[in-house]
Amino acid sequence: MIMRTDERPASLAEREERLTETSTLPASERIMSPPGPAVIELRGFSAYYGNFRALHDVSFRIPAKQITALIGPSGCGKSTLLRCINRMNDLVPSFRHEGLMTYHGVDLYDPAVDPVEVRRRIGMVFQKPNPFPKSIYENIAFGPRVNGIKGNMSEIVERSLRRAALWEDVKDKLSQSGLALSGGQQQRLCIARALAVQPEIILMDEPCSALDPIATLKIEDLMKELAKEYTIVIVTHNMQQAARVADNTAFLMMRPDRAGELVEYSDTDSMFTAPKDKRTEDYITGRFG
Ligand code: ADP
């Protein structure tokens, strides 16, 4: 196919230029950003547990309706970053932050922002599937009910289960316990539960680490399907998984003071084929981690 020169896909150099266009600024003002509208933006964001700084001056933008992976060695602050996005870390008494994290331009940590509403719009799926000890139906219906979401509940339940690719497996046993499902099905139930309250962003903290390879692939396929409608941010220790599913990848690493910093952020292909930072290259080639 012949493309006009102004229609050709951006070259790697052009993409790099876009990603580093602010690189002459000080770290706290340097925002790494893929093309496209951003939903979440971090600007000089730091996270603390008491005196311990877990994240150091992180700045980047998370684009809408794409999958963004956070990778890096254990303890570099991936989960902390993820949990800051929906204010889950507010539940840790010693937690505090510095810098800015915005959601559609609104400061997520502004005192006027209701963290409960934040968690409805920005849902979360955890490492270990954690269905409520209730029926499959009730697992899904609970969230919409407590959030006052209007509509026919059976339809909401069916729609959520269909979106999570679980409907065909469970449509004849909605009154059975969610805990009776297989691990992979339980994780899809948790995804359906997150979808039921109509979020915009879904955060996933190592969602496949407790699953076998087949269940893992099902979740990965589901993530790609969901990214047509939702923004997904995933923490994974599995670099192959990041390479398989993520549009963009952020690589974090610990500084000598053990605070995590963002070393590199780019579209996933560039990250894995042409990393710009030697530390990224060493990590993805397995020299440490
Ligand atoms: P990762 O997900 O990359 O493994 P985490 O975000 O879980 O990293 O942890 C980053 C650092 O913050 C670690 O040193 C960890 O011990 C510390 N940390 C995480 N959660 C807490 C907490 N609730 N209280 C105190 N320190 C914590």
Image (cartoon, rainbow, N blue to C red):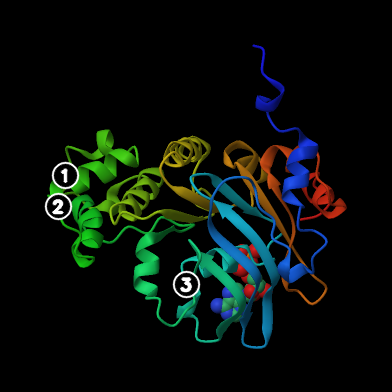
Examine the rendered structure and indicate whether residue 168 appears above or below residue 259: above
Q: Which residue does the image show at 80% across and 38% down from the upper left?
A: 13
Pointer 2: residues within 10 angstroms few (<14), some, or many (20+)? few
**Residue 26, horizontal then vertical, whole percent:** 79, 69
Q: CA distance from mark 1 to mark 3?
A: 30 Å
Pointer 1: residues within 10 angstroms few (<14), some, or many (20+)? few
Horizontal side of 155 relative to 167 (left or right) equals left
Mark 2 in CB contact with mark 1 (< 8 angstroms): yes
Disc 3 target residue: 87
Q: Which comes sooner in the sequence, label 3 or label 2?
A: 3
**Residue 85, horizontal then vertical, whole percent:** 51, 66
Disc 1 target residue: 155
Q: Which residue does the image show at 40% across and 80% down from the upper left?
A: 112
**Residue 21, horizontal then vertical, whole percent:** 76, 53
**Residue 61, horizontal then vertical, whole percent:** 61, 57
> Mark on residue 151?
2
Of the four image quadrants, the one with ligand 1 is bottom right
Q: Identify the amino acid type marked 1.
A: Glu
